[in-house]
Image (cartoon, grey):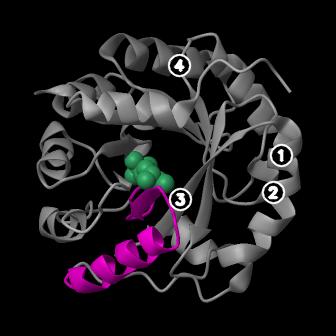
Amino acid sequence: MSERRFWVDSHLRSKLKSGEKIHFTLLDPDKVSDLSKVDKVAEITVSEGTDAFLVGGSIGVSERDVDELVISLKKWGLPVILFPGNVSGISRHADAILFMSLLNSDDPYFIIGAQVLGAPLVARYGLEALPTGYVIVGYGGAAGYVGRARPIPYDKPELGVAYVLAARFLGMKYVYLEAGSGAPEPIPPKFVRKVSAFKGDSVLIVGGGIRTQEQAREAINSGADVIVTGTAIEENAEKAREIIRAVKKK
Ligand code: 1GP
């Protein structure tokens, strides 16, 4: 276990309390084998004010790959948060973990099975667990396919509302609305707006398919607390600048 650098939950909540919105830069260990590319992404995103690195992916992720990526990101001084697709996504070097249950999976493994297998590692490594209801919407991508989810249609926000309420009543402090990495369209603002009205004290994370400053801003204006971007930054690290600025704009 490495020395604790952050209490991530209180760090993020104090930013939100001061009226700031949050941006997470997602890096998938399966897609960024070249660590010099990681440095470039980090340099740009840190200089623009991204708030944390999210590390994870749905397929082809070994614990060793995650360790290497986490270690290379820690030098930038921001929280490194695990976003695990499975038990192999847990690294002792991270600061925190989105301890997620894929609420709309049909497979108990992704609702509670993997969590039971991973929990002893989270405890042994001293990772801060951020209890997260993970809900797949629309396209779903690899996360939806691998996680055997029944994605909520974009035109059924009332189902999203029911999930966010269930997540809150189960004590989850974070709810992640996921369109799937590389989604052709992000979750519609109307959907985010309806769901966010019921989020209570939970932190609403929105990701999947956000590629432009307009889309990032629309999600924020609709009530998202945290915007996650992976693919857009992977394809063109410079793209991060306008997206982060749009999230941070007051
Ligand atoms: C995927 O929500 C994240 O889990 C980010 O999606 O790669 O489409 O930005 P993108």
Q: Position of residue 6 (x, y in %)?
A: 59, 23
Residue 147 circle label: none
**In the rendered view, does 74 fall on the left or right side of 37?**
right
Q: CA distance from mark 4 to mark 3?
A: 20 Å
Q: Amino acid at mark 4?
A: Leu
Residue named by callout 2 = 119
Residue named by callout 3 = 132
Location of residue 209 (image quadrant):
bottom left
Q: Helix, strand or loop at disc 4?
A: loop
Q: Amino acid at mark 2?
A: Ala
Determine crowd level at label 4: few under 14, some 14-19, many 20+ residues with C-alpha closer than 10 A. Answer: some
User: Contact (CB < 8 A) between labels 1 and 2?
Assistant: yes
| Foreground pick, 136 / 15 | 15
Determine crowd level at label 2: few under 14, some 14-19, many 20+ residues with C-alpha closer than 10 A. Answer: some
Q: CA distance from mark 2 to mark 4?
A: 24 Å
Q: Helix, strand or loop at disc 2?
A: helix
The magenta segment is: 155-182
First in sequence, mark 1 or 3: give its number. Answer: 1
| Foreground pick, 41 / 109 | 109
Q: Amino acid at mark 1?
A: Ala
User: Contact (CB < 8 A) between labels 2 and 4?
Assistant: no
Q: Position of residue 161 (x, y in %)?
A: 28, 77
Q: Is residue 153 above or below residue 196?
A: below
Q: Amino acid at mark 3?
A: Thr
**In the rendered view, does 11 fall on the left or right side of 80?**
left
Residue 78 circle label: 4
Residue named by callout 1 = 123
First in sequence, mark 2 or 3: give its number. Answer: 2
First in sequence, mark 2 or 4: give its number. Answer: 4
Q: CA distance from mark 1 to mark 3?
A: 17 Å
Q: CA distance from mark 4 to mark 1?
A: 22 Å
First in sequence, mark 4 or 1: give its number. Answer: 4
